[in-house]
């Protein structure tokens, strides 16, 4: 079984903001593969289904971004998973141009507070992740306003394509081909 966790902030106030990119990818996967996210468990909203013949839990932590680790830790413990092999976390990255993806097996938080909390909660940096580029903040704009802001029309089109590619990457990762996913999807689609 895999836990596929998309990071974001709950409530409609944050819907489709840059920081909710993980929620957007999980919602896309749920819609495309008919997985209902209708259960309140593990401090999140979740739903179970099948991808590539394997059982998955789609999870949207409702703890707010900076406390995402509590939800993910609860799910990992409940299903007795090996986080290094059975957890995929999807989240926004301001260091990537909007539309680009970066897939890794493990790594540091890179300044992302949600990932920092997950690492602290799990006690390891070893879990697969998909970073979805949301673009760097423009000069004069503070970081919070940037990540909690919405995309312009041109950027949103790039991000919609990235959501589809991130979902395709999840399928490859669930099928056990993270190397193939990295080779295919880590290529720059948008130059910075």
Image (cartoon, grey):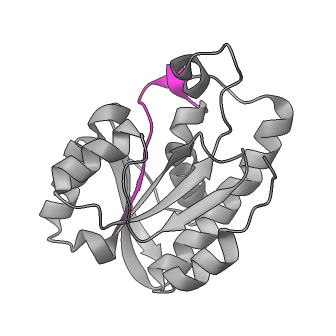
Quadrant containing the N terminus is bottom left
Above or below for 29 versus 42: below
Q: x and y percent of residue 133 in the render? A: 64, 47
Q: Looking at the picture, tell me which residue is in the foreground, 12 or 74.
A: 74
Is 4 included in the stretch rendered in magenta? yes
How many numbered marks, from 0 up?
0
Above or below for 167 versus 119: below
Q: x and y percent of residue 166 in the render? A: 61, 62
Magenta-highlighted residues: 3-15
- Which residue is at a point 42% across and 31% down the rendered structure image? 9
Q: Looking at the picture, tell me which residue is in the foreground, 32 or 104.
A: 104
- Which residue is at a point 59% across and 77% down the rendered structure image? 181
Q: Looking at the picture, tell me which residue is in the foreground, 102 or 14.
A: 102
Instruction: Please state if 54 lies on the left or on the right of 130 as rendered.
Output: left
Instruction: Please state if 122 lies on the left or on the right of 188 as rendered.
Output: left
Decide if residue 72 is in sight here. Answer: yes
Decide if residue 32 is in sight here. Answer: no
Q: Looking at the picture, tell me which residue is in the foreground, 145 or 58.
A: 145
The residue at the far top in this view is 140
Q: x and y percent of residue 33 in the render? A: 56, 66
Above or below for 53 versus 154: below
The residue at the far front in this view is 139
- Which residue is at a point 62% across and 22% down the rendered structure image? 149
Instruction: Please state if 154 lies on the left or on the right of 162 as rendered.
Output: right
Above or below for 52 versus 126: below
Quadrant hosting residue 86: bottom left
Q: x and y percent of residue 92 in the render? A: 54, 44
- Which residue is at a point 82% across and 44% down the rendered structure image? 157
Is 66 included in the stretch rendered in magenta? no
């Amino acid at each position: 079984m895999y836990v596929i966790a998309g990071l974001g902030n709950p409530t409609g106030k944050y819907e489709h903001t840059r920081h909710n990119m993980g929620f957007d990818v999980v919602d896309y996967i749920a819609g495309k593969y008919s997985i209902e996210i209708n259960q309140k468990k593990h401090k999140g909203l979740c739903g179970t289904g099948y991808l590539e013949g394997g059982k998955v839990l789609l999870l949207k932590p409702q703890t707010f971004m900076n406390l995402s680790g509590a939800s993910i830790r609860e799910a990992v413990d409940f299903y007795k998973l090996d986080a290094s092999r059975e957890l995929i976390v999807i989240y926004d990255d301001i260091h990537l141009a909007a539309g680009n993806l970066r897939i890794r097996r493990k790594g540091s938080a890179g300044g992302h507070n949600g990932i920092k909390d997950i690492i602290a909660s799990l006690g390891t940096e070893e879990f697969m992740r998909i970073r979805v580029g949301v673009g760097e903040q423009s000069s004069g704009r503070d970081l919070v306003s940037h990540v909690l802001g919405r995309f312009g029309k041109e950027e949103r089109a790039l991000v919609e394509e990235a959501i589809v590619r991130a979902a395709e990457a999840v399928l490859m990762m669930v099928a056990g081909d993270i190397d193939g996913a990295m080779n295919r999807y880590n290529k720059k689609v948008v130059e910075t």
